[in-house]
Structure formats: structure tokens, C-alpha cells
Image (tube, helix red, strand yellow):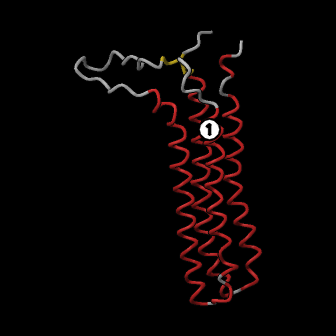
Amino acid sequence: MKRHHFSASSAPPLPSCFPVSFSFPPLSPDLRLITPNIFLLLLLGMGAAYGTAKSGVGVASMGVMRPELVMKSIVPVVMAGVLGIYGLIIAVIISTGINPKAKSYYLFDGYAHLSSGLSCGLAGLAAGMAIGIVGDAGVRANAQQPKLFVGMILILIFAEALALYGLIVGIILSSRAGQSRAD
């Protein structure tokens, strides 16, 4: 089985369908190494920011309607902030699996790292959107009917579980990197 790897000094050749006068600028090997972390942190950051902002709107409206319940209403904001920690964990795992001084970075390792970052990032984005929507509506509903608090927390836990599933898949995919060299 032939193993593909990119040399640190050259970019892969262009397909023959491109005109001779057109060429892509060479992609820095360092950029190829950090691309999974860029996607991961970008997507998870967007999810955490959306969840925090949307839940924060609900907390602000709670402060107007029922100021005594504001501290209880911060739970969705905290849960949205936890998404960033998931991204940090996967980013560290991916970064420790990359040796920038190595002469080559195997294609399998690159795809394993990229899929790890994308799976955790997209799951975190979805979880952040769910937490934001549930947090906003749940906090407002809790202002009118305090018995809904436990139900809101349960729905938030299930929304957070989406990101946890992405974290687990990301860890599994990252652990597969490096196995392409095992003979």
C-alpha cells in the first residue's frame, strides 16, 4: 500500500486541467499543520458566542421582569462558555500530534486532524445554537413560570451533549493520526 505524504518543501502538483498560466500560490507547510485548529476554534467560537449572546438577551430580559431570578438564569450562559473548553482540549490534542520539525506530514494524519477539528467544531456550533435558543426562551418562560427551571436545565444538558459527542469523536479521530506510519 502506497503512503502519500507532503514534503515540507513543495506543494502538491496541479491537475492537468488547469491552464499553464494559472497556478495556486504555494501553501505553507505551517499553514497546513494549523488548519484543523483554525476550523475547530472558529466553529466552536461561533457556537459559544451565539449561545452566550442569545442567552444573555434572555438574562437581560429576566433582569427587567424578575430581578431576583437573574443569578439562576445565568446557567445557559455558563453552559455556552463551556463549549470553548471542548475546543481547547481538541486543539491541544491535535497540536501534540504534530511535529513541525518532521520532514513530512502524512496525508492520513492531516485528514485525521482535520476531521477531528471539523467534527468537534461543527458539533460545538450546533450545540451553541441550541443552547442559545433554549436559553433565551427558557429564561423568559422561567420568569413567568418558575416550575419550568428543571425542564430548561434538562434541555440545556441535552444540547450540551451534542458538543460532548463531537469532543468524543474528535478524540477518537485524533488518536488515529500517526497510525499510518505503523508497520
Residue found at x 62% / y 69%: 77
- Tell me where residue 38 appears, x and y as whole percent: 50, 42
Residue found at x 65% / y 50%: 86
- Farthest residue in the top direction? 1
Q: Which residue is mark 1?
A: 116
Residue found at x 62% / y 57%: 127
- Tell me where residue 163 appears, x and y as whole percent: 66, 52
Tell me the quarter of the picture where residue 62 sits. Answer: bottom right
Q: Secondary structure at mark 1?
A: helix
- In the displayed structure, 38 sits above or below 136; it is above
- In the displayed structure, 41 sits above or below 132; it is above
Tell me the quarter of the picture where residue 157 sits. Answer: bottom right
- In the displayed structure, 19 sits above or below 147; it is above
Q: Is 24 positioned to the left or the right of 182 in the image?
A: left
Tell me the quarter of the picture where residue 170 sits. Answer: top right
Quarter of the image containing the C terminus?
top right
- Tell me where residue 49 appears, x and y as whole percent: 53, 61
- In the displayed structure, 13 sits above or below 152; it is above
Residue found at x 40% / y 28%: 27
